[in-house]
Amino acid sequence: MEWFKNNYLPNQEDWTKWDASPTFAPVELLKKAPKAWLGICELDILKAEGIEYGQKLQKAGVEVEIKVYPGAPHPILGMDGTFITLIVWKKLLLTYYLCSQGKFSSYFSVMMSLKPSSVLQVGRNLIADAGYALTRAFEESS
């Protein structure tokens, strides 16, 4: 993430401007936001920022639904069966490496517990929920 931040926002003073991240938007601006549905991946490096943004919207009086998808990594919407197979191989390599180093982390244990079919199902659920939220938004606006 640091690489992306440094390349998209090379001036450090821009890092906390609201047009770089809605998390930094002033309350007056957040109050003007429409209802929101936020689908957040549990294993996303941006998970905390997504939840924080949703909570800021709620504090500003905006109706927000925040849903965290368990076991979902950041790129879940771009994943397919081939990509999932790569994750299984990655798990095996991580197991070997971490065991040889005597290291173990909670992230690793979550990743190791994932089954390819469960990740794909979480992705299907996220897409279905997003479609439902979009349908509701269009119905309410007409």
Image (cartoon, helix red, strand yellow):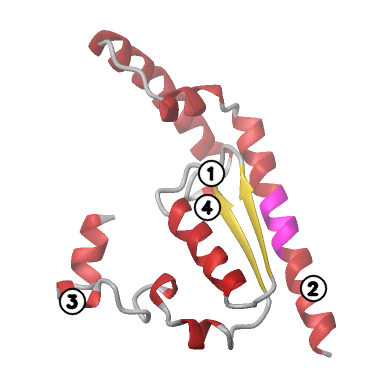
The amino acid on which the numbered mark 4 sits, given as a three-letter code, is Gly
Precedes in sequence: disc 3 or disc 2: 3
Task: Residue under label 2, please give it.
Answer: 135
Give the dominant element type of the magenta stretch: helix, strand or loop.
helix
Q: Which residue is drawn at 27% across and 10% down?
A: 102
Q: Circle 1 — which element?
A: loop
Q: Circle 2 — which element?
A: helix
Instruction: Find the distance from the CA under tag 3 to the CA under tag 2.
Output: 39 Å
Q: Residue at x 53, y 35 (%)?
A: 84
Q: Specify the segment rendered in magenta.
A: 125-130
Precedes in sequence: disc 3 or disc 4: 3
Q: Can residue 10 be seen in this view?
A: no
Residue 118 sits in quarter? top right
Precedes in sequence: disc 1 or disc 3: 3
Task: Residue under label 3, please give it.
Answer: 13
Q: Which of 12 and 131 is in front in this view?
A: 12
Precedes in sequence: disc 4 or disc 2: 4
| Closer to viewer: mark 3 or mark 2 | 3
Mark 1 touching mark 3, by CB under 8 A?
no
> Could you say where residue 123 lies in the image, as x and y percent from the top left?
64, 47
Q: Circle 3 — which element?
A: helix
Q: Which of 112 and 87 is in front in this view?
A: 112
Task: Residue under label 4, please give it.
Answer: 78
Quadrant the C terminus occupies: bottom right
Precedes in sequence: disc 2 or disc 1: 1
